[in-house]
Image (cartoon, rainbow, N blue to C red):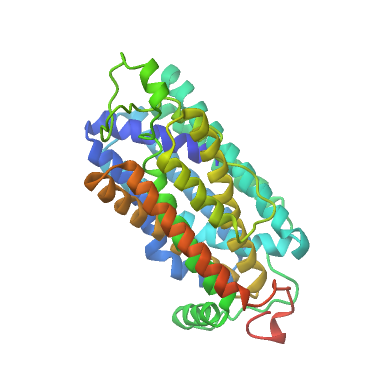
């Protein structure tokens, strides 16, 4: 995560240095998301029926090799924007398959009662990596050059592969029997039937989409969140804004907000989505930077709780030979919600203002929370893991 966060900051700088185009720089984001939407449904069944350990290690080796070609090409003076796009696309595709395998591997390594804590620990480490990576990238890019810093990301993949190789496990639950002869189409259909047949899983997926939709709206407008008091003190500075509003200036402390916007989560509460909606409603009317700083920290914590409970429940509910497929569909749902939310928020902000976009995001979260509460009230209790052969649903 540290290496990927470094590249996430540095690679757009490299693209902009080559092209001078903000549009071509922004296109890198699409190359990270699109492969998941295209290949996720295939990657899930492959991880469920194949060797998850090899998929994870192989994915790391492939991504590391691809990323390393960028600084090598730069040293040789042959680096082009086309190569960067191809590397980004292929590396993101390799990530789809290794990520699908990880979803199935973690429950096979951790006892059910410790799974929430394990997912929380992974989320916490991921968050710290996303905080440390940009700091490292900024310091090194300014001193040794942007392209050279990409070596950190390449090395991190090879180190990860070596460490994972030391884990002596099949990354499968004992007694699990995948069906390698079943077609990919039938495997996908079985995963969809499982989701449709499990009320809680289906409900949490819908909640996840609403969560990601609203989060996409909020994420796109952290930078324009403003404070009247901060603006009065620094009014002499000339700063770019996405949309100017009366008596409000942009808050330059957004980097500090983002630094505290992630936290560990060992357990998740269905009410976390309601907390998120309430916080976003507060952001829509708030004018003080300190309040916004605290609110965004709590907001990101509640978002993390919502995500963790969805992942953990799906991992516990799905049998081993469906776990990767079911969780990949969850990931696709989540990533699919963010661009829709960002686009909606941009449209609303253009027609009205940023606080109105926040208000709409808050309504989406609160409605999704209320609907989920009503649906889950008549749903089943938390799942317990049982042998796959007992029931096709594994509940």
Residue sitting at the far top: 236
> What residue is rendered at 42% in x and 32% in y?
287
Residue 280 image position (x, y, % from top left): 46, 47
Measured along the vertical axis of the image, is residue 346 above or below residue 236? below
Measured along the vertical axis of the image, is residue 212 above or below residue 349? below
Q: Quadrant of the C terminus?
A: bottom right
Residue 379 image position (x, y, % from top left): 62, 77
Q: Quadrant of the N terminus?
A: top right
Residue 204 image position (x, y, % from top left): 54, 67
> Where on the picture, by quarter, is residue 33?
bottom left
> What residue is rendered at 38% in x and 31% in y?
226
Foreground: 231 or 338?
231
Residue 89: tell me if it is visible: no
> Where on the picture, by quarter, is residue 350?
top left
**Would residue 21 be found to the left or right of residue 106 on screen?**
left
> What residue is rendered at 27% in x and 35% in y?
242
Measured along the vertical axis of the image, is residue 23 above or below residue 140? below
Residue 283: tell me if it is visible: yes
Measured along the vertical axis of the image, is residue 199 above or below residue 211? below
Disc tally is: 0
Foreground: 142 or 208?
208
> What residue is rendered at 37% in x and 22% in y?
231
**Would residue 291 be found to the left or right of residue 353 on screen?**
right
């Amino acid at each position: 995560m540290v290496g990927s966060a470094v590249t996430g900051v540095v690679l757009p700088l490299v693209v902009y240095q080559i092209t001078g185009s903000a549009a071509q720089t922004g296109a890198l984001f699409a190359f990270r998301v699109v492969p998941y939407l295209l290949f996720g449904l295939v990657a899930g069944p492959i991880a469920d029926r194949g060797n998850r350990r090899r998929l994870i290690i192989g994915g790391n080796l492939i991504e590391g090799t691809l990323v390393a070609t960028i600084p090598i090409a730069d040293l040789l003076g042959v680096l082009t924007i086309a190569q960067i796009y191809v590397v980004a696309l292929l590396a993101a595709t390799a990530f789809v398959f290794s990520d699908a395998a990880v979803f199935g591997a973690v429950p096979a390594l951790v006892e059910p009662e410790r799974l929430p804590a394990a997912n929380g620990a992974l989320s916490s480490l991921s968050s710290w990596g996303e905080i440390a990576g940009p700091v490292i990238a900024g310091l090194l890019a300014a001193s040794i050059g942007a392209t050279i810093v990409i070596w950190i990301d390449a090395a991190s993949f090879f180190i990860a592969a070596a460490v994972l190789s030391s884990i002596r496990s099949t990354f499968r639950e004992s007694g699990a029997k995948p069906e390698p002869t079943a077609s990919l189409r039938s495997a996908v259909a079985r995963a969809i039937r499982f989701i449709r047949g499990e009320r809680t899983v289906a409900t949490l997926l819908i909640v996840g989409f609403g969560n990601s939709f609203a989060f996409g709206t909020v994420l796109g407008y952290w930078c324009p969140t403003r404070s009247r008091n901060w603006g009065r003190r620094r009014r002499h500075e000339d700063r770019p804004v996405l949309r100017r509003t009366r008596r409000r200036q942009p808050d330059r402390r957004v980097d500090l907000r983002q630094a505290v916007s992630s936290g560990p989560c060992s357990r998740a509460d269905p009410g976390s989505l309601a907390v998120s909606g309430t916080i976003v409603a507060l952001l829509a009317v708030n004018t003080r930077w300190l309040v916004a700083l605290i609110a965004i920290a709590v907001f990101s914590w509640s978002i993390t709780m919502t995500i963790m409970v969805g992942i953990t429940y799906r991992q516990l509910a799905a049998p081993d030979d469906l776990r990767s497929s079911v969780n990949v569909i969850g990931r696709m749902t989540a990533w699919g919600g963010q661009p829709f939310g960002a686009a909606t928020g941009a449209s609303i902000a253009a027609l009205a203002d940023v606080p109105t976009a926040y208000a709409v995001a808050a309504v989406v979260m609160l409605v999704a929370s209320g609907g989920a509460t009503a649906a889950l009230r008549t749903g089943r209790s938390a799942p317990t893991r049982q042998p796959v052969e007992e029931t096709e649903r594994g509940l």
